[in-house]
Amino acid sequence: MIVLLKLILAHLVGDFLLQSKKWVDKKEQKKGQSIILYLHALIHGLLVLLLLWDITYWTLALTLALLHGAIDAIKLYAQRENSKTRWFLIDQALHLVSIISIWMIWIKPDIDFLELALLPTIWIFATALLFITVVSGVIMQMLMSSWSKALNENSNESLPNAGKYIGMLERLFVFIFIITGNWQGIGFLLAAKSVFRFGDLKESKSRKLTEYILIGTLLSFGIATVTALITMQLMGS
């Protein structure tokens, strides 16, 4: 497992610490004709050798360097100005998959994936996470639809889907805090949200907005708390 962690660390250092904005811009301008693309891939290979500190892994390092360059090239040619964020996420996901795949081929870790897949804990967590991120968002939207219509009568422009993702992250944090036994983190999260929302409430002077935010917050925290408690109960049994 330590080898996998070193491979991931090498990727993070190469992609985020040693790659400047200027390098990224040059790669996007010249794409496959940019020497920076190949230098960037070479640096990744050298970082792998440096962190593993074993020359016998040179074929592993070379393979990862070539894969990294190929994935970056695919992103450079496929992305458009309005899809850079999406392709950044795809790019990082492909890098992670390639690192794990190469690690499994070279190191051959003694992991029984069938046994892992049969663990009830994994299915409990998968179900709980899906519920508090996607399903509960739809439930809250349905429950609060009448209030949101009243609120929109005096609308103020906001980021597209901002509330949806804030709610998903909020419930994820509450769920994680409870599962890990850090209940004090919920108080910190609630206080932080109150600070950010104070300006909106103060400027709007709208009772409807205040009630809408309070109901949404209590619903979100309540769903995440109950889900986490049920998850812990199922895991305990």
Image (cartoon, rainbow, N blue to C red):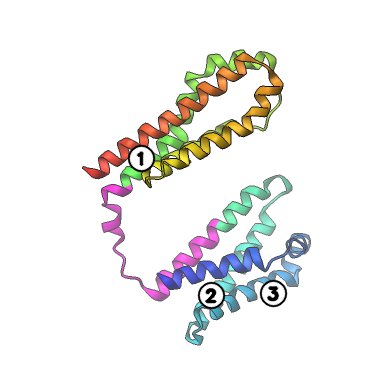
Q: Is residue 166 above or below residue 3?
A: above
Q: Residues within 10 Å of mark 3 (few under 14, many from 20)?
A: few
Q: Where is residue 21 in the image (x, y as percent from the top left)?
A: 74, 61
Q: Position of residue 131 (x, y in %)?
A: 40, 35
Q: What's the residue type where badge 1 is placed?
A: Thr
Q: Is tag 2's residue or tag 3's residue first in the polypeptide sequence?
A: 3
Q: Residue at x 64, y 57 (%)?
A: 75
**Mark 2 lies on residue:** 63
Q: How crowded is mark 2: few (under 14 residues within 10 Å), some or many (20 or more)?
A: some
Q: How far apart are marks 3 and 1 (CA)?
A: 43 Å
Foreground disc of the pair 2, 3: 3
Is residue 143 rendered to the left or right of residue 31?
left
Q: Position of residue 222 (x, y in %)?
A: 42, 29
For label 2, the SS is helix
Check residue 222 for magenta coloring: no
**Mark 3 lies on residue:** 39
Q: In this view, does 151 lie above or below 137?
A: above
Check if mark 2's residue and mark 3's residue have beta carbons within 8 Å: no
Foreground disc of the pair 3, 1: 1
Q: What's the residue type where badge 2 is placed?
A: Thr
Q: Is residue 189 above or below residue 28?
A: above
For label 3, the SS is helix
Please report the bounds of the magenta region as a residue range.
93-122
Observer able to see residue 140:
yes
Q: Which residue is drawn at 65% across and 23% down?
A: 201
Q: Say which quarter of the image contains residue 92.
A: bottom right
Q: Position of residue 64 (x, y in %)?
A: 54, 72
Q: Say which quarter of the image contains residue 101.
A: bottom left
Q: Distance between the residues labelled 1 and 2?
A: 36 Å
Q: Is tag 3's residue or tag 1's residue first in the polypeptide sequence?
A: 3
**Mark 1 lies on residue:** 127
